[in-house]
Amino acid sequence: MRTLLCAALLWAGAVHGADIAIVGATVIHPEREGSAGVARNATVVISGNKIQAVGPAAITKVPPGATRIEGKGKWVVPGLIDAHVHFFQSGDLYTRPDVADFNAVVPYAQEVARNKARLAATFKVWLASGVTGVVDIGGPFWNFDVRDAAAASPAAPRMAVAGPLISMIDRAKLDIGDPPIVKISSPEEARALAARELARNPDYIKVWFIHQKGDDLAAQEAIVKAAGDAAHAAGKRLAVHATELLVAKAALRAGADFLVHSVGDAPVDDEFIALLKKNNALYCPTLFVVMGYRYALSNTWKPTEAEKRLADPLVLAMMGDLNAMPKDKLPGSVTKLMASPPAVAASGIEIGNLRRVWDADLPVAMGTDAGNIGTLHGPSVFRELQLMVDGGLSTREALRSATTYGAKALGADTGVLAPGKLADLLVLDADPLADIQNLSRASHVIKDGKVFVPAELMRSLQ
Ligand SMILES: [Zn+2]
């Protein structure tokens, strides 16, 4: 019976123009402060792919013939948005040979081919985790095909995308014909690569701003500015990886609209905050990703409860591969990490900087950097959100980061629950303001007005 009901809902949601009503739920508005942010006994009406009405159940009319979802004892929030992911990577051990080279076990070309072939499943785990929008902030040129596949798929998150990273350094081990990272040595080269990417209509131009001892920061900044000017002339945004304060400031001076990581080497200062404000730039903390590498490469990675339910089971099954791997196949760095596993914790500097940027009323977009080793597509959002809450954001603030501010990164009219907005939202079995992990308890995930049931999505993986 349960399966029949779910199938009926999926079908009803898939019918063009069908109305849906979630009746009598507690609706959470993460963009609002205080009691205005929680509306009890409320009804949400969806028509087509838009929210039509949100209001008290007593006065909000349910259209005749609407598919009804009982909201009593449930919570409704906007769909989550992960502002930093990479589909060319899977999160498993074999996905970044430039960091840990396991080519002797699984050749990198095989890993990438598997990730391509697995895209439909990867889309589904995102949706099952309540993530209705993702920003793939850099990868091979085939990233643009991933965006097309997501747009054409009935069960996929919305997606914004960047192409290959305009980089200060080379990553030869990732180059199997369509490299995700391309070394650029001059503003002219930056303009030329940006032009090739702009021909594919990216949402962002992305720069990997790696500044090493002895590098000429001003010359590097000129490369970033050339990329940014090209992006802006085409009406696109500039996203920059810049993890040191000095470098992040240079990125902002060069026009960055989106800093895709925390500043991690020093506390941010007034000048940095002023530059962020001047650009109206987004800041994405990505607190977990470094921890993910440390856990996975020291063989201490353990799935969370949410990952056991919502991660791609094929990837999950590979996370313990170090247990059985012959010692002579292990990269030296991994042998060392396994011999004395490091203590793994979030960076205090990054947590402090998150709080400082948040308190300056700047938009902080939740992002996981999923696809990196140890950071799995989908349920890693619950690890990241937990770190944000443990770091001092309220559950409401963390939810705002993952919805209202995430929508700014995605560039889509979603992330709040109001008439006219895109119908991307979650119906939850437990209160996410009481425990942020309850965001993983969706009974229904609605994306673009279509209803999905997480358990059904997970069962449909092959
Ligand atoms: Zn990344």
Image (spheres, grey):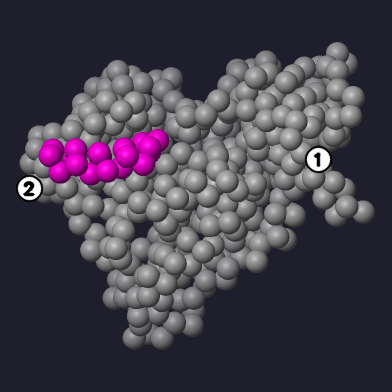
Along the line of sight, the residue nearer the viewer: 278 or 305:
278
Residue 156 numbered tag: none
- Residue visible at 51% across and 69% down? 319
Along the line of sight, the residue nearer the viewer: 400 or 49:
49
Q: With 247 as the anchor, is 304 left or right in this view?
A: right
The residue singled out by tag 1 in the image is: 12
**Secondary structure category for the residue under label 1:** helix
Along the line of sight, the residue nearer the viewer: 138 or 361:
138
Residue 214 numbered tag: 2
Q: Is residue 194 magenta?
A: yes
Q: Position of residue 337 (x, y in %)?
A: 36, 70
- Residue visible at 32% across and 71% down? 101
**Secondary structure category for the residue under label 2:** loop
Q: Does residue 382 appear in the picture of this structure?
A: no
Labelled pair 2, 1 in contact (Cβ < 8 Å): no
Look at label 2 and name its amino acid: Gly
In the image, the segment drawn in magenta is 187-204
What secondary structure characterizes most of the magenta part?
helix
- Residue visible at 89% across and 29% down? 65
Look at label 1 and name its amino acid: Ala
Snapshot quadrant of residue 451 = top right
Q: Which marked residue is nearer to the observer: mark 2 or mark 1? A: 1
